[in-house]
């Protein structure tokens, strides 16, 4: 699909850019708040983004940018994980405030056990597709349950949450946080492979 051009595209871009600026400052703005900051009428703003979840999704996708286009180039699962982390973590760090603002919205909705009125729930899930792709060489070598467990375990250290723990609690730098995350991810991959090898279901050296 070709990108949109003209007034509609410019207005949408203005909305996303304004929302991104507000989220980078630590806010989780409503559509109305973004409309006011962008000097766009509320009626116009809601034509582009009917609810806060849709707006935040657009900002998050913009922030993720090149991460969403990542594809593994080797059949070595551990190397693919390292490549993905090297691609993603600097970008996640750059837009850390944006991703934390999105996470805050998700947590607030969870705490409310639903969303007010007819507002849809903000959901996340890009990391599932990315990790499934990174680990795809292990399909057929691990059982489906083992594969899912590995992806789920690595997902705990692939995202803005890792910075919440390693930077905010442990006071590590971005570089140190990245090193810890990559070490842990590789250890998980090796452990999953070793378990399968020990049970005689996977040849060594995959």
Image (cartoon, helix red, strand yellow):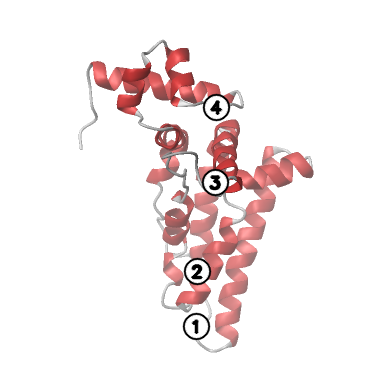
Q: Nearer the viewer, mark 4 or mark 3?
A: 4
Q: In which quarter of the image is residue 193?
A: bottom right
The x and y percentages for residue 55 are 42, 31
Above/below status of 92 relative to 72: above
The x and y percentages for residue 46 are 35, 25
Marked residue nearer the N-terminal end (4 or 1): 4
Q: Residue at x 44, y 25 (%)?
A: 31
The x and y percentages for residue 104 are 59, 38
| Residue 203 image label | 1
**Furthest residue in direction bottom, as rendered:** 200
Q: Do the residues labelled 2 and 1 touch (CB within 8 Å)?
A: no
| Residue 148 image label | 2
Marked residue nearer the N-terminal end (4 or 2): 4
Residue bearing the label numbered 4: 23
Residue bearing the label numbered 3: 86
Q: Residue at x 50, y 86 (%)?
A: 201
């Amino acid at each position: 699909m070709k990108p949109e051009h003209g007034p509609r595209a410019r207005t949408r871009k203005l909305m996303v850019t304004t929302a991104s600026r507000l989220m980078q400052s630590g806010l989780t703005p409503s559509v109305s708040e973004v409309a006011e900051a962008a000097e766009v009428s509320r009626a116009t703003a809601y034509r582009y983004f009917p609810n806060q979840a849709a707006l935040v999704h657009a900002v998050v996708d913009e922030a993720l940018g090149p991460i969403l286009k990542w594809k593994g180039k080797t059949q070595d699962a551990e190397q693919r994980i390292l490549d993905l982390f090297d691609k993603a973590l600097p970008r996640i760090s750059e837009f850390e405030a944006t991703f934390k603002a999105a996470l805050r919205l998700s947590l607030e909705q969870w705490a409310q056990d639903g969303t007010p009125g007819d507002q849809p729930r903000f959901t996340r899930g890009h990391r599932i597709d990315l990790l499934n792709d990174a680990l795809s060489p292990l399909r057929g070598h691990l059982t489906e349950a083992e594969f899912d467990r590995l992806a789920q375990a690595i997902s705990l250290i692939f995202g803005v949450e890792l910075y919440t723990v390693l930077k905010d609690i442990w006071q590590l730098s971005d570089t140190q946080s990245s090193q810890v995350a990559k070490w842990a991810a590789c250890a998980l991959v090796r452990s999953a492979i070793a378990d399968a090898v020990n049970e005689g279901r996977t040849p060594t050296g995959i």
